[in-house]
Image: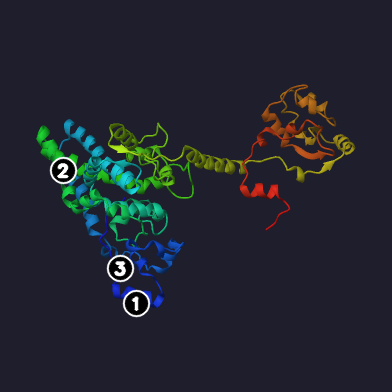
Amino acid sequence: MHFPSNDTSRSPRSFLSLMESKLDVPLFIEDPDRIPTEAVPDNYVAYTLKHQEALPPITWSNWYKELHWLHVFILFVPPTLGFIGACSTPLRLETAVWFVVYIHLTGFGLTAGYHRLWTHRAYKATKGLEYTLAILGAGVVEGSIAWWARGHRAHHRYTDTDLDPYNAHRGLLYSHVGWMIFKPRRKPGPADVTDLRSNPVVKWQHKYYLLLAFIMAIAVPTAVSGYGWGDWRGGFVWASLIRLVVSQHSTFCVNSLCHWLGDRPYDDKLTPKDCVITAVITMGEGYHNFHHQFPMDYRNGYKWYQYDPTKWFLWTCEKLGFATHLKTFSDNEVQKGELTIQLKNLRHKQEALSWPCEKSDLPVITWEDYQRQAESRALICIAGFIHDISDFFDKHPGGPHLLKKNIGKDATTAFFGGLYDHSHAAHNLLAMKRVGILLGGAPHGLEEKVVPPSQHLRVTRHGDLAENAHPEVSL
């Protein structure tokens, strides 16, 4: 989500032609907006980073030369004027209500229009709704649809790489506003925007964008307050300037906070995260992990109770006939992604716990040897395993006498209901005290009791399954 950049060239075209002829570097590396599909190599990111020369890094000695002055003006002048004006302009109740209403209206222009309609094509809108969203979106002053959507598509395609316009790996401040304040060190990766170039609403908004931005950002909110209840000054300061600053930074949080705050319930490969706090700040765009996994879904808040006013707005538009073909991703695939992360988290938790010795690591003991050793050690045989219970006499809830009477004996029946049907916790603890296996194993019919409850279900990697299923196969 970004302002358009006026930095359209890095070096003279003659130099690029010479570079291409001498180094065999295609020109599309320097002009990603004019890249033929058949020319894109499979390893485009690595290929581009290798062949595209980045601008020199920003330092204390050159930072002022690298400022993007249009963005600096938009980012710093409105808040400065707004906060100065707010100190001497009381906020009337009517203006406060209008502030809330208008920030949501222009916000929907971005979230429902720029983002979910034109960037991700998550639904189809009537021409009336398209023009309405295009006009409202201009009121946040973040560039035209064409510029905004092009950058955001590159963000999704090259997330967390140097071809991502607002790469989160470069820091929270950079992904929030730094990438706009300074000229980019590289061009963003290519993104297909042929559909936007042929869209009449997008072309119309792009042509009249500056006029629309002034009208919707300054004129309309000021005029409504002025003509409506005589608060011209309050309308300009609060509904126009302060509202503009809040709207912009709400959007910027999608690029920054939504990659830093929250959890990743659907995929942990990239930085986007889900968080109800950022969802409230960004009008529903805070379920960013879901969105990056399923970008063409018209919802960001996948679950019905998740705060996503844009989702509810689009649902309402569909019921009123203004929107159609609202796309949703397969519930089966969404839940599959969620389960994958849950299993991975369980695997990490499982690996952090202590487990009984594997059978292959335990010595095999005959019955005679077991009885002989039990004369000097507190050994009990249960379900074919020999257990050393020396440290448990004083801890046994039933008293030490029940343990002493079974030393050197087979206490399987007593443990599994004869004297007391022990709990799963008791069975799990017992398995931790294994020191050997009885020759011949457990009697037939006790196979289920050999495995402690905590190990009936275990999370196993695919490689482990393949190795256990085909131990004789080696690659």
Nearer to us in this view, 70 or 35: 35
Q: Measured from the top left, where is residue 233 in percent x and y?
A: 12, 40
Q: Amino acid at mark 3?
A: Arg
Q: Nearer the viewer, mark 2 or mark 1?
A: 1
* Among numbered discs 3 and 2, the one appearing first in the sequence: 3
CA gap between label 1 and label 3 equals: 14 Å
* Placement of 94 over or under 292, stated as above or below: above
Residue linked to disc 1: 18
**In terms of secondary structure, where does tag 3 sit?**
loop
Q: Residues within 10 Å of mark 2 (few under 14, many from 20)?
A: some
Res 35 → quadrant? bottom left
Badge 2 is on which residue?
85
Answer whether labels 3 and 2 touch (C-beta < 8 Å).
no
Q: Residue furthest top?
A: 419
Mark 3 or mark 1, which is nearer the start of the sequence? 3
Return the mark for residue 165. none
Real-space CA distance between mark 3 and mark 2, rounded to the nearest whole angstrom: 40 Å
Which quarter of the figure is the C terminus placed in? bottom right
Residue 118 pos. (x, y %): 31, 47
Helix, strand or loop at disc 2?
helix
Say what amino acid the circle numbered 1 marks.
Leu
Q: Residue at x 35, y 49 (%)?
A: 255
Residue 305 in view here: yes
Residue drawn at (39%, 56%), measured in percent from left and top? 170
- What amino acid is at disc 2? Gly
Residue placed most toward the observer, 40 or 283: 40
**Residue 10: mark in rendering:** 3
In this rendering, would 112 be left or right of 162?
left
